[in-house]
Amino acid sequence: MPVHRWNAALDGEFSEAAIRRKLESQGYRVARYVYPPGTVFPDHKHGIDKVDAVIAGHFRVVIGGHVAVLGPGDWVAVHRGVTHNATVLGDAPVVSLDAIKVE
């Protein structure tokens, strides 16, 4: 599971608006969510391809058995039908962009 990290040299200064524009330019419809500390998403699957991107806070994700910790400017692709889960780490909420591929 590759973790994509914001590259200021290529993408400019990191901001919520900038990462939203980047995802939208790649054909994603983007929604913003805020998850409080302690939030846990147990194993589940989706019938669509999506991206989970972090704006603030830290998310531990397990996708297809691979573990990563995402921080601000990080994102991962979650392919349809792949089992995954996520947990908010630490005492700060996670601000996340949930992006689904427009077909």
Image: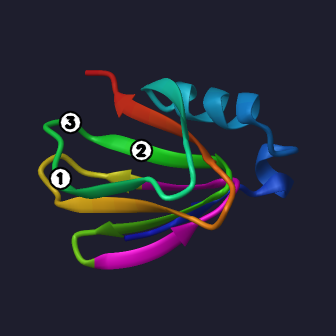
x and y percent of residue 17 in the render?
A: 74, 28
Is 36 above or below relative to 40? above
Q: Secondary structure at mark 2?
A: strand
Q: Residue at x 49, y 32 (%)?
A: 26
**Residue highlighted by disc 1:** 44
Please, what is the dominant secondary structure of the magenta stretch? strand
Tag 1 near tag 2, CB within 8 Å: no
Task: Look at the image and give the residue range highlighted in magenta.
Answer: 66-76
Between the residue at mark 1 and the residue at mark 2, the CA separation in whole angstroms equals 15 Å
* In-front residue for pair 52/103: 52
Q: How is the image coloured?
A: rainbow
The residue to which callout 2 is attached is 51
Examine the structure image and report whether residue 89 is included in the region drawn in magenta. no
Q: Amino acid at mark 2?
A: Val
Separation (CA) of disc 2 from disc 3: 10 Å
Q: Which mark is residue 48?
A: 3
- Residue at the image position 67 percent from the left and 37 percent from the top: 19
For the C terminus, the quadrant is top left
Of the 4 image quadrants, the one containing the N terminus is: bottom left
* 69 falls in the magenta region: yes
Left or right: residue 9 versus residue 43 is right
Label 1 crowd (10 A; few <14 / some 14-19 / many >=20): few
Q: Amino acid at mark 3?
A: Ile
Q: Amino acid at mark 1?
A: His
Instruction: Tell me: residue 17, above or below residue 79.
Output: above
Residue 46, percent across and down?
18, 42
Residue at the spot x=45%, y=36% of the render? 98
Sooner in the amino-acid sequence: mark 1 or mark 2? 1
**Is residue 60 rendered to the left or right of residue 48?**
right
> Residue 7: x percent and y percent?
75, 57
In depth, the one of 93 and 19 nearer the eye is: 93
